[in-house]
Amino acid sequence: MTDTPDYKAESPTLEAWRMFRRNVPALAGVVILTFIVLATLYGTFFYSGDPYNVVWAPHEPPGVTPEFPLGTDYLGRDLVAGLLTGGGPTLAVGAAAAAITMVIGITLGSLAGFYGGWVDNLLMRITEFFQVLPALLFAMVLVTLFSPSLWTIAFAIGVVSWPQTARLTRAEFLKIKELEYVTAARAIGARNKRIIWKVILPNAMPPLIVSATLTIGIAILFEAGLSFLGLGDPNVMSWGLMIGANRDYILDAWWPVTFPGLAIFLTVFAVSLIGDGLNDAFNPKLRER
Amino acid sequence: MSSSFLLRRVGYGLVLMLGVVVLNFLLIRLAPGDPATVIAGEMGGATEEMLESIREEYGLNKPLIVQLGIYVGNVLRGNMGESFFFNQPVASLIAQRIGPTILLVITAQILSILIGVFLGVIAARKPNGVMSGFVSVFATIGYAVPVFWTGIMLIILFASVFPFFPAEGMQSVRLRGADVFTKTLDIAHHLVLPAFTLAIIYLAQYARLSRASMLEVLGSDYIRTARAKGAAEKTVLFKHALRNAALPILTVAGLQFGNLISGALLVETVFNWPGMGRLAFDSILRRDYPTIMGVLFFASAMVVIANILTDISYRWADPRLRGKS
Amino acid sequence: MTALLDISDLKVTFNTRYGQVTALDSVSLHVNAGETLGVVGESGCGKSITALATMGLIPMPPGRIAGGSIRLADEELVGASPARMRAMRGADIAMIFQEPMTSLNPVFTVGDQIAEAIMLHQKVSADRAFKDAVALLDRVGIPSPAARARDYPHQLSGGMRQRVMIAMAVSCRPKVLIADEPTTALDVTVQAQIFDLLNEIQRDFGAAIVLITHDMGAISEMADRVAVMYAGRIVEEAHADDVLDFPQHPYARGLIDCIPALGREDHALKEIPGVVPPLHLLGAGCAFAERCEHANDRCRHEKPLLANHGHHPAACHGVEEGRI
Amino acid sequence: MQHLTRLLGAAAIAAGALGAVPAFAEGGTLVIGSTQVPRHLNGAVQSGIATAVPSTQLFASPLRYDENWEPQPYLAESWEVSDDGLSVTLNLVQNATFHDGEPVTSEDVAFSIMTTKENHPFQSMFAPVETIETPDAHTAIIRLSQPHPALLLALSPALAPVIPKHVFGDGQDVKSHPANSAPVGSGPFMLEEFTAGEAIILKKNPNFFIDGRPKLDEIIISMVKDPSSLLIAMENGDFDMYPFMAGSQEIKRLEKADHLTITDEGYAAVGPINWLAFNTKSEKLSDVRVRQAIAYATDRDFITKALHRGVSTQQRGPIIESSPFFDETIEAYDIDLDKANALMAEAGFADGMELTIDFIPGPKEQQQSVAEYLKSQLKKIGIDLTVRAAPDFPTWAGRVGGHDFELTMDVVFNWGDPVIGVHRTYLCSNIRQGVIWSNTQSYCNEEVDAILNAAAVEQDPDKRKDLYSRFQHIIAQDVPIYFINATPYHTAYDKRLMNPPKGIWGTMHPMDRLEWSE
């Protein structure tokens, strides 16, 4: 009998990572995102230039003058400097909004899912209430009324996007709560708090991680939308603001709108690829393929 | 369909909408900046007495709760108050614009569901095939591109460089007097670009969702039974499988409605589409609070109605739920 | 006269994470018109794969028919065109499954699903097919068939649904009816009714039945001949009475001994030690070697063949050498 | 579902086959594309170009004007100003009727002028009017508390629409009267439809009191928010005229369109000035030398030639250069960095200072781009400028109106006679906290007040011109505002249009002589 290799058991996360590694689009997403984040954080070291400075004639086409490879905007400001400094606020707002969404969403969702009864009923009515509000419209009202700054935008996006996460968390909690290992934990005397944090939440994490990644994408698009409408923080250079500011000259110069649009697209595209990759990796059904 | 379920659902919807009205009223009143200066500002050359007369006229100096009471009372009687900017009742302003928004949103929804589900089903046939990879990547592209950027690019491409489609608006004013058929054709001609721009975003969600839902359904026993009966693969896919896979898609279509309205706001602004979204945007820039409130109210009403319709159609579509309250 | 359904040296492989796995290793089976062949073995031994291969329902990829032939009324099915297979499925050869609860489409009425089976193979109008469906429901013993035909699957009990499956399967008078564990999911009283129904069907329609089960009781009830399968191979095949009374292959003996018989309380229930090895880890020799008390070196290294000596072949060196 | 998509697909193909534009409708329709959104259509109580364009088609007015600032008869077929200048008699035409058939009488003229006096933001227009006597149905005598040479210009269509007393005189507050959105006037066109924020449809007034006019059957004003889409629509021929176009990109692009003509005529009376205003009360800018230094440091030619690519013309004083009262001999503050630095040192700011600059949200090229230019330019005289953007008009108006600013770019209209559009910016009496486009610079010079009040009543045109010259010299000296350029308003219109609106009021004037040549 040939010695049969022992049938080594893999932890689900390890197996998910192995599945994720084999998923080409997801890896492409990771590469793109890392490039963008690095460019945003360290770009300004290598490429000096204040995005607000009028440095050249307006609407200089890309690739004409060596110092300004991507050309200039309607005021004659360097687009490369704009893209590099614009990335920071866009990503920051995206991440902050996603964080706020996850915190509110998970807290309310877990409480509703775990305790059930009137708690669940009340929280779900609140969730539905926020879901009825058209997100962008409500965010616009919030941002205009409380004067646009990065934090008001992040908060506004968070306030309108948490219902989805809350619903997801609640569904996961309802499902996991019934499983034996939770009853087992309860049997050995674990208190509710411990069960929520240590037992149920870790198992509910996979779909939540996926949703968190996708929320970052949604938040970035949201911020871009608000800035495009002119409701972004006018004194902070962000990609959406660049598009909104140059939009009136689109017929004269297509690049000041196209490059920031491309930057937003690449970031959200990368984030979504990663999100999909995580989703397939964590999804047991797809694993046998 | 038990009517008690319907009544409860509609009643609950009304409570939600009332909540929206109260929340927005309070929110706007709490915000900094005095609406009177805005109204006066618009007219230029305001004196203190003019500001005072405006406050009086718009009831701005009464205590908050009283103002709220008056406002809710009016809303229940269908009077959404006067627009600060347009000097017209808000209700008539919105009435002119609710049609175009619904037309845009419904067309975009249908387009994204049809194309999305079709792509999803194709992808589901061979989960690891090339087509499946293409669908998910293409779908993600559609989802990741900022909608206003797509809109602008489409205008440049298909209205300026290749002038096949009009660059703005819902109908050409020249054809106002024309017969119904030409006018419908003209509106459809204006509708193509905006509807497609709005549809692209949700195409991705539907493609991904229908792919996952189809994969799950294709693994079930009744599909094997259908094949064992000798049914053609096309029948198995589009009749047996899709009919079941459609149920979760239906739910998402309902939930998606709120996002569609947000998306519509951006598309309407870019394409100058005379809908509620653009009215809301302009009103926000003009601090025209009654109109903002009006649009928020009607937008949430549309979402509530959409949710109720989804619930009803879901219960009708799934025999297992039919009849149960 | 060759058998109505003749499967010889069928080899089916699957590509899995662990590389290519042989699910069926040169399986040979045959059944004649009006006869019932029982196929017995633990779950995972390839019984269902054989049935699905016969119906041409193995998803390719990852599955593949690597060799052998399946002949139905002298027509070769392996490599037949998909169109031919589709025309044949449901008309000449039909199948009923284990899980009646999930084998019917939840969103269509029972009558429609049977009518569809009829219309797939016969040129009849829709309402004519629906009338036939109602008649079939009556034929399989469902009370007030006209009303039930308009019901949805979730409105019927497990037993009723299995009857609907049978009605659907026999709607076009198939030559061979494959029943893959038809009663496993049903409670005992309903099982008996289903077996009686299958017998009646066989008598009326003259169909050959391949009954796949791990319920030895069903075998003794229904089967004329029995084939015992283990790890994708046929280890023993003979008349039902011979296998039940004089099981040759150690695995077959173990199976028979597991049946709790009335009146034999004197000894504890016997069970076969160990577990069925994963297919990708099978050694070169006899698949049952690890769990067989009579296994010797030859058993472990040389694969025993189903030598067809007489009417009771068994794939076991021990039996051949007369050791057991 | 399938049915709908087939319809849409068919429509797209069929429409494509039709060519970009459905068949060009014959029959005298003029379609105006506009980015301006009027609140309502009654120019008697609402200032601004958005309302003035439709209002001047719907309502007639006592007088109208030609290309060289000369008043012409309109509802008043003749008029006399008394020697002491304290009364103006208007003899009305006999046959003028409102759109609802009621005759236009002196009662209506009196009611209109008094309503405008009480409700219109431009208080100075009719401030001196005390009473209006109506001895008979076709004679109105305006009694003035002091001579008011600006009155005749104030009686133009844009500023003094004659509104029917029997409609607006029903006791409701005229500012929010429902008829403002569905007005009855006596002008060349009647209202067919007004969808707020979308379109205004005017149709020919069959019994307009000037026979043979208007030539057009219909004028449609279609509102388009996005200038680029409006541009493409103009190129594709969806619209026939695009007034108040100020972007150099738009002007340059439409000049290339062979079916259009571009003109900058028709805006003389509007007199839009793009300027840099100083808050003279903020401690850094209270010293006139600092303001002069900033003026000398700014290169007006660079702004008009480079930033505006030559489409805008320079403006050196408070009165629009196209106005007869303009005096070119005033100090223009052409660029002189040495003088600027010297002045900064003299004022004690040799090592420079920090300032913030606001700008009115609007055409970026006129406002934000100049602010950004100043940010790099003023560095040369040691001023570190921060550009403070405002998300929308109300926020900016709140800041500047509330005197919470140091520098701001702004655009203010002269509105014809200096009494109407110029005085409001410089009179001490008009320093009003919280009110935009008042004397937000808090600039107070007794002598200037005296000159302006004298000019307001001076009937002799030459003496009036001298007074305004002295006024312009003092302003040039005190520099409460550095004047940069006249907003380059242009009108693009279809070549086949005859008698395009090139008068001093341009499209804010009855377009009853406009017609198609083919």
Image (cartoon, coloured by chain):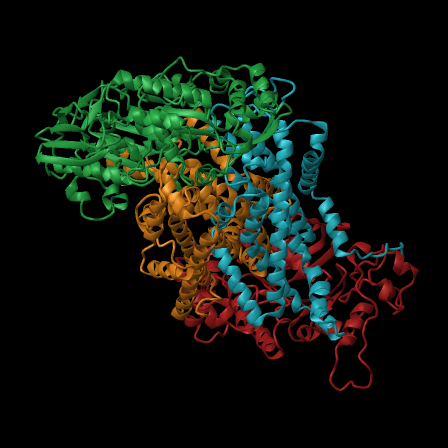
Chain colours: A cyan, B orange, C red, D green
Left-right relation of A86 to B320: right
Q: Is residue A143 above or below residue D325?
A: below
- In this view of the protein, which residue sits in the foreground, D37 or D377? D377
Extreme top residue here?
D329
Extreme right residue here?
C297
Left-right relation of A169 to D105: right
- In this view of the protein, which residue sits in the foreground, B316 or A193? A193
Left-right relation of A19 to A69: right
Percent position of residue B309, x then y? 42, 58
Which image quadrant is residue A64 in?
A: top right
At horizontal 83% and vertical 69% (from top left) the residue drawn is C250
Q: Is residue A146 above or below residue C313?
A: above
Percent position of residue C152, x then y? 47, 67
At horizontal 51% and vertical 39% (from top left) the residue drawn is B147
Total marks in image: 0
Left-right relation of D370 to D54: right
- In this view of the protein, which residue sits in the foreground, C220 or A274? A274
Is residue A134 shown to the viewer in this render?
yes
At horizontal 56% and vertical 15% (from top left) the residue drawn is D339
Is residue B130 shown to the viewer in this render?
no
Percent position of residue C181, x then y? 64, 67
Which image quadrant is residue C119 in?
A: bottom left
User: The C terminus of chain D is located in which quarter?
Assistant: top left
Percent position of residue D294, x then y? 53, 22
